[in-house]
Each structure stands twice: as C-alpha cells, then as structure tokens.
Image: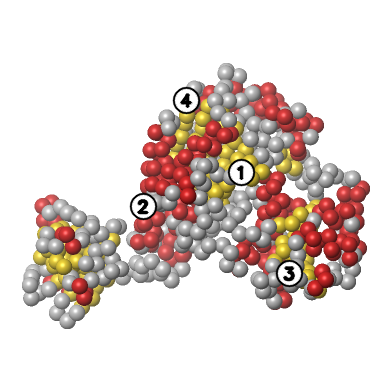
Amino acid sequence: MARFIDDLKRTHSCGDLRLENDGDEVVLFGWVHNRRDHGGCIFIDLRDRDGLTQIVFDPSEVKEPFPIGDSARSEWVLGIRGRVRDRGDKLRNPRLDTGAIEVLALEATVFNKALTPPFEIEDGVATNEEKRLEHRYLDLRRPILQRNLIMRSKLNNTARDYFIGEGFIEVETPFMVKYTPGGARNFLVPSRLTPGNFYALAESPQLYKQLLMCAGFDKYFQITRCFRDEDLRIDRQPEFSQCDVEMSFINQDDLFKVLEGLVFRLWKDVLGFDLKERFPTGEFPRLPFDESMRRFGNDKPDMRFGLEHVELTDIIVEHDGGNVPLLQPIAAKFKDGTYRKELPEEIVKAIRVPAEYKLSRKDVDELEKFCKQNGAKGLGRAKVNDGGAWTQSPFAKVITDDLRDAINKACGAEPGDLILLQFGKEARVQTVMANLRVHLGKKFGLIPEVGTDGDWNFLWVVNPPLFEANDDGTWAAAHHVFTRPHDEDIAKLESDPGMVKCYRYDLVLNGFEIAGGSIRLHDPEVQKRVFNVIGLSDEEGRDKFGFLLDALTYGAPPHGGIAFGMDRVAMLAAHTESIRDVIAFPKTQRANDLMTGAPGPVDAKQLADLKIRTAVDPK
C-alpha cells in the first residue's frame, strides 16, 4: 500500500484512457465494479467517478498481481499499475468510453476490502429508496448520482462566474437570525447564553440583502443554504440551496434581463443547449398572474400541452344556474351582490377532453377518485353527443338547453368530447383542476418523459395580488410584506387591498417555479401602510422589523431581487423526478436522515444547559 500512495501517484482516472494511450504505463485507483473469471484470466472493471476501465490479471504474462485479482470482490478498493493495450476490433465495448482498451495489471494492491453491499452499485437499481438513503454513501457511488452532483457543481460554478462577471459582489449572510412573522414556518434554535430566547434558521436572506442595498453594495449575490419547516414533496426539502440576488436602482425589466442572461449561460455552458434557438430575442414570455390562474389554475403552469381550463362562472350566473341545483346557489350569490365578482368565493371551471383521448366510464370514475384525493367532493362530467346533447352526466336531465349550449360553446366542445366540471370554493377548484390537468397530460402522453430535454418552456408569471384574504376576512401578504405595490394601486391599500397588484414575479420552467422575487418597498411610509393592512400596528411593525424600517429612513435606494432555486434547477436539468437525486444527503418525506438517524433525542443535561423542558422525556 505504501508504494502506491507514497511512491506511485495516480496518472489517470478510470474514464480517461483511449487508444492513443496504447502501450503507456499507467496507475489507476478505484473500486471493483465487477469481476469475471474467464478460466485462467481475471477481468475486473475498476470504477471511479469518471468511468470504468477493464483490468486484466493474466498469470501467463505477469504472475505477481494475480492473487489480488483472484481474491478481489465487489467494492474492494484497489490500486493498479499496468500497461494499456488495444482490445482488438472484436473485443471492443462501444458502450464504454474506455471500451477500446484494457490495462494489463503489472502490480496491484488492496487499499481496503469491503463487505457485500446491501444493494448493487448500478444505475436503475430496484432497491427501495429508504434502503438506499440508509446507506447513502453507497448510493452515491452510482454513476447517475455522481453525474448529477458533478453537473450541479458546474451549475454553481457557472452561476458564480456569471455574476462576478456582471459586477456582483458575493456576501455571506447569517443563518441564525431574528424570528420575524410571515412566510414559511421557521426552524428554531435555542440560545444557551440568553435562556428562553431563540434564533430562527433563515428561510432566506431576504432582510439582509435589502440591508446590503441600503449599505450601498449595489449588486449582491450568494449561493446559500436556507431552511423551512414545511411539509415535503418531490421538489422540496427542509434545507435547500438558492442563488440569491439583489440589485439597486433597477426596475423589473432590468432584473429579468440579468436572470435571463444567467439561465442562457447555464443551459449553454453546462447542459450544452442553446436557448436562443427557442427564445431568439433572449427574453422569456410573460404571463399575468390572473391569466395563469384562469387558464391553468395555478401560477406555475406547464405550457407544453393544452387541456386548458375554461372559466364558466359568468355563464352560470348569466343563466341563473340553468336549473341545476348544485349551480343555482353560486349564481344566486352573484345576483344578490353578497360579494364582489372580482374576488369570487366560488367559481365554476371545466376542462374539455377531446374525443381522440379515449376515456371509458371506469377511467372517468378513476379521475373522480383522483379529484377527491386532491380535496374535491366529486367530479362533474358530460359526454357531448351529436347535436350537443349531454349523456353520461348527472346534469343531463335537469340542465336547460340554453346553459348546456353556452357551456359547449365556451369549451369548444365537439361530438364525442368529454367535459369535466369542478365548482365550489375558488382555492379548492383551482387546486383540483390544476392537478387534474397535469394528471390528464401525463395519462395521455402529452408531457415529455423524464430523461429527455423535451421542450424547455420558460416563462415569467407577473403582476400577482399583494394580499390574499384569510378565512376570517383579514388580509395576509401573498408573498412577503416587503413587495412594492404597483404605483397606481397604492391608493387602494386601505380601501381595496384585494385589488392591489404588485411587482412580484416567478420564473417557471415546465410547471416548476425555479425562481421568485420582487421589487422591494424602499419607502418607509408605504411599508408601514402595508404592515397596517395585514394587521401590524406601527408599534408591532417596529418591534418585529424595526431594524429594516430604520435602514429605510437613512436613504434606501430603489431595489429588487430574486432567489434562483438551485435544487429544482438541478433536478430539471438532470431529468429526474425527485429533488433527492441532486442532493448529496437528502431527508425523507418526514424530514428524517435515515443514514445518521437525525433528528434524534438529546440528554437531560443538554436540555438543562439550554433551560428547556420538553413534553417528551429526554433519554
């Protein structure tokens, strides 16, 4: 072992060697990927992060290293000194970059033996994810995960180079911060030095990057870790990475130009895909928030396929519910004027499924089960026959001809088409219909499969409302309270907060939000008014955000920024369905680390040092 480590240094990786190396003496280090005994000769595929090289132990040519090749097993760590030779035309392996050559072992050493792994170190391994996460250090040896993390490293480095080249300054901001209300739930960290007090783990550097603008840094960025105590899903982890950006003296268009430049650079330099073929102007299209909700039911639409929503609420109101008992109350509420039409409590939406997409009654029943799993009470449906009549519908015998014909016309329905209907509370209808659209897109094969570039469909979703209504009639910030309202809407802050639009924006890629940000409020007086709308008095606002309000009074420049989600970008760029495939040591759906056992209990002394008692007895 000492000879290989101290005297012989690795000359090549296991993915480097080609025919032009024929006859070279080389030194390789790596893991035994597999071993084959061919009656006198032992063949081992030696693996490192760059690839595989076939090693030949042939006692008829070199006797000394043969016992090591004969005894080696899967995942043993070996060092090999050998001579490169041509395999010959008939024995070449076109599936490997190194498949034209092999290395005849002249000397070998065992750095470490290995137990039999609990699963094969292969791409496409069938072992369940929990077992692989328990042994993540083995799972990470799989070539696909190594390629993912190498690609992610290139994304980070390219982003950093891009921003430095654009005159940005990289500044690190604290992880342990003051808890402030709004946004996601924070993880809390007890303070030993000030018992009874807690830090919050930063869910983003939001306030600090605004303070950096007040400090005159003009252009800031950092690739940073953030923390949110939220329920997990395929594109969310409790700790995540974002490329955080803030700029002074800009408007929304200025920021879009910078971010579009970053995306074009990442896709070209890291993924080898020139987005100018798709977006020749160098700009991504923009979609107003209201239109996105109307057409797709959410603010992160996948626009690579159709099946768009059809808004039917106005038609239902116009026809007084068309004699349908479930629709008449919705129409009556509008007629009575009990709430404004611009902010409906209940809506009616439809999706038209063209006749070419065959759905049996069983299929439709399965769709209803899917909708119920997403919070719906059921799923309305109607099959359109010749002449526009409805069949296979609970409404067919009661709906008026006029309303039926109006719905058919609004949906563009033709004979053989199926109309799927959802009505009720707006938030629920939007969520159910948005998920149903994507579900149908996958069912009908309208969305490119994971593992292909498909169509990189970027767009900006812009101009959302600044506030959203709570169930008790109060208001909350739809994003965060530091977002600048449209100038023409500032007068509505007290009189009509639900109609205030703001300079907030999300960058969406194929149905995933990959970046989000806003132009900030730099006027302390307007900031106080926004606090008041969400129920924060001047005193409460000062108590929670006094440091920011103070900074704004000392000459704050107009500024804005965005956070670019590096985990989601890497997930999409790697063509994988789970964000865990691009994170070295991810958590499970329940935020557990199966490899280390975190989170775990602490002993009573640690709790005593922190002056903390728990409802669960410490171990």
Q: Residue at x 46, y 68 (%)?
A: 128
Label 4 – label 1 distance at C-alpha: 29 Å
Which badge, 4 or 1, is on the more N-terminal residue? 4
Label 1 – label 2 distance at C-alpha: 32 Å
Q: Residue at x 70, y 64 (%)?
A: 371
- In the picture, measured across the screen, residue 88 lies left or right of residue 541, that is left
Q: Mark 2 is on which residue type?
A: Ile
Label 4 with label 1: CB-CB less than 8 Å:
no
Where disc 2 sits, the SS reads helix
Residue 323 percent coordinates (x, y)? 91, 63
Q: Residue 417 — which label?
A: 3
Label 4 – label 3 distance at C-alpha: 58 Å
Residue 396 percent coordinates (x, y)? 85, 70
Where disc 4 sits, the SS reads loop
Q: Residue 217 — which label?
A: 4
Residue 174 percent coordinates (x, y)? 47, 34
Q: Mark 4 is on which residue type?
A: Phe
Q: Residue at x 57, y 38 (%)?
A: 517
Label 3 – label 1 distance at C-alpha: 31 Å
Which residue is label 2 attached to?
150
**Quarter that holds the N terminus:** bottom left
Q: Residue at x 63, y 41 (%)?
A: 462
Q: How is the image coloured?
A: secondary structure
In front: label 4 or label 1? 1
- In the picture, measured across the screen, residue 555 lies left or right of residue 58, that is right
Q: Mark 3 is on which residue type?
A: Asp
Which badge, 2 or 4, is on the more N-terminal residue? 2
Tally of numbered discs:
4
Label 1 with label 2: CB-CB less than 8 Å:
no
Given residues 149 and 133, the one toward you in this image is 149
Furthest residue to the top? 554
